[in-house]
Amino acid sequence: MPSFYVYSMDIIFATHNEHKTHEARAILGADWHLMNLHDVGCNEEVPETADTLKGNALQKAQYVLDHYHTNCFADDTGLEVEALDGRPGVYSARYAGEHCTYQDNVNKLLAEMKGISNRKACFKTVVALILDGETHFFEGRVDGTILGEPRGTAGFGYDPVFQPDGYDQTFAEMGDDVKNSISHRGRAMRKLMEFLKDKVAEK
Ligand code: IMP
């Protein structure tokens, strides 16, 4: 028996995505006991009906707090295309319809952008954290270009048509590590994780 116990603090990440959970645990280390929605027995879809990324992230975090009464955070991401006045934005997941696939979304985007020479776009992520009853937001952004044709097979979503500025590969052609080091979500999550680490140091 150890003569002392090390307590870690519970926090719920409002996601069913094991990949995102694994990534967050790796950055956060052992001071926080990070659980996702499966871990707490939540198998239903968490509502996200707001019309901004910030609104959706907060709505998801608030839902988890209301149901599980534990510190929590949630993320929401959108692809904003300059020539499409920021679309698909907050509607990126369901751009091509309610039950569409990633491929449907990419096809719709490429069709809408046919003949358009301004290919500038960015991904934005907002993370909402509710910690000890207080809300904090963290943002991450990456700028890039929408290609005319998909390239690469890794990643998900719009990765095959998004080439970040300063790189000659799409997100779907680069490894996870490279993508995470520059991506919208990677940036927002690292800000969140730094904040949480500082909180532990203050205690
Ligand atoms: P979510 O808020 O993380 O669920 O992202 C909403 C939608 O944005 C996803 O369904 C994808 O279509 C798209 N998306 C989010 N993150 C990425 C990414 O890293 N690469 C490509 N597409 C993404």
Image: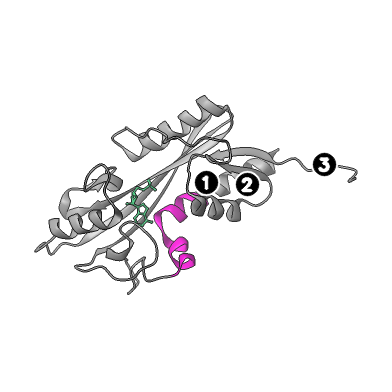
Looking at the rendered structure, the kind of residue marked 3 is: Tyr
Q: Earlier in the sequence, mark 3 or mark 2?
A: 3
Looking at the rendered structure, the kind of residue marked 1 is: Leu
Residue 178, x across and y down, in percent: 46, 67
Image quadrant in which the N terminus is located: top right
134 and 92: which one is in front? Answer: 92
Q: Nearer the viewer, mark 3 or mark 2?
A: 3
Q: Residue furthest top?
A: 66
Gap in Å between the C-alphas at discs 1 and 3? Answer: 26 Å
Q: Is residue 126 above or below residue 150?
A: above
Mark 1 residue CB less than 8 A from any atom of ligand 1: no
Over which residues does the magenta segment extend? 175-190
Residue highlighted by disc 1:
192
Residue sitting at x 25%, y 64%: 145
Q: How many marks?
A: 3
The label number, if any, that marks residue 5 in the structure image:
3
Q: Crowding near pointer 2: few (<14 within 10 Å), some, many (20+)?
A: some
Mark 3 residue CB less than 8 A from any atom of ligand 1: no
Gap in Å between the C-alphas at discs 2 and 1? Answer: 9 Å
Regarding mark 2 in the picture, which secondary structure is present there?
A: helix
Q: Crowding near pointer 3: few (<14 within 10 Å), some, many (20+)?
A: few
Looking at the rendered structure, the kind of residue marked 2 is: Lys
Residue sitting at x 22%, y 44%: 97
* Scheme of image coloration: one colour
Regarding mark 3 in the picture, which secondary structure is present there?
A: loop
Q: Crowding near pointer 1: few (<14 within 10 Å), some, many (20+)?
A: many
Residue highlighted by disc 2:
197
Residue 156, x across and y down, in percent: 37, 59
Q: Earlier in the sequence, mark 2 or mark 1?
A: 1
Residue sitting at x 65%, y 43%: 33
Q: Is residue 32 visible?
A: yes
160 and 55: which one is in front? Answer: 160
